[in-house]
Amino acid sequence: QHNGLGKVVDKFHLHNPQVVIAAINDVLTNDSYLLNAARISKMLANKPFSANEMLIKTVEFAAEFGPSNALRPQSYDMSWIAYHNLDIVVSVVVLILLFAYGIVKVLSLMLRG
């Protein structure tokens, strides 16, 4: 809606057919939506670089400058454990088990006494 290409209907109002029909009629009858769609279409057709041009420029850049540390993902330098978040998963599982153990101990003490 912020580009003037359509109308937002809140999901809580979708059960009301009048709201949906009013939004559709507004988009179909208001010329501002048509003008904005034509403007965006023209912008996309005249964008500075097409996908093919961008691919060619990227390949030429890589051929000229070679591998770059700035473009290398940091995940290449991570350990297997950190890459798969196993350190976090193990910590959370241990905390859950300790919490469950504590609850069981408290309940067993309450039931005894």
Image (spheres, rainbow, N blue to C red):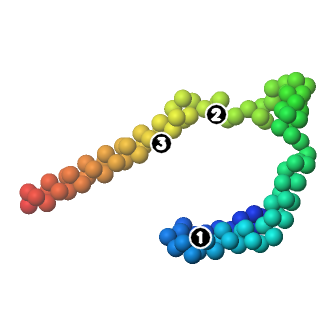
Identify the residue position indicated by label 2 in the image: 75
Q: CA distance from mark 3 to mark 1?
A: 45 Å
The tag earlier along the polypeptide, 2 or 1, is: 1
Q: Which of the two marks, 3 or 1, is nearer to us in this view? A: 1
Vertical arrangement, residue 22 with respect to residue 110, above or below: below
Most distant residue in the left direction: 112
- What amino acid type should be assigned to the residue bearing mark 1? Val
In-front residue for pair 105/17: 17
Q: Residue at x 87, y 48 (%)?
A: 45
Q: Which of the two marks, 2 or 1, is nearer to us in this view? A: 1
**Residue 13 visible (yes or no):** no
The image quarter containing residue 5 is: bottom right
Secondary structure, mark 3, is helix
Disc 2 residue crowd, few under 14, some 14–19, many 20+, Cα 10 Å: few
In-front residue for pair 89/31: 31
Disc sitting over residue 7 in the figure: none
Identify the residue position indicated by label 3 in the image: 88
In-front residue for pair 77/59: 59
Position in image of residue 95 (x %, y %): 37, 48
Quadrant where the N terminus sits is bottom right
Secondary structure, mark 1, is helix
- What amino acid type should be assigned to the residue bearing mark 3? Ile
The tag earlier along the polypeptide, 3 or 2, is: 2
Q: CA distance from mark 2 to mark 1?
A: 46 Å
Disc sitting over residue 20 in the figure: 1
Secondary structure, mark 2, is helix
Q: Residue at x 36, y 43 (%)?
A: 94
Q: CA distance from mark 3 to mark 2?
A: 16 Å
Position in image of residue 88 (x %, y %): 47, 42
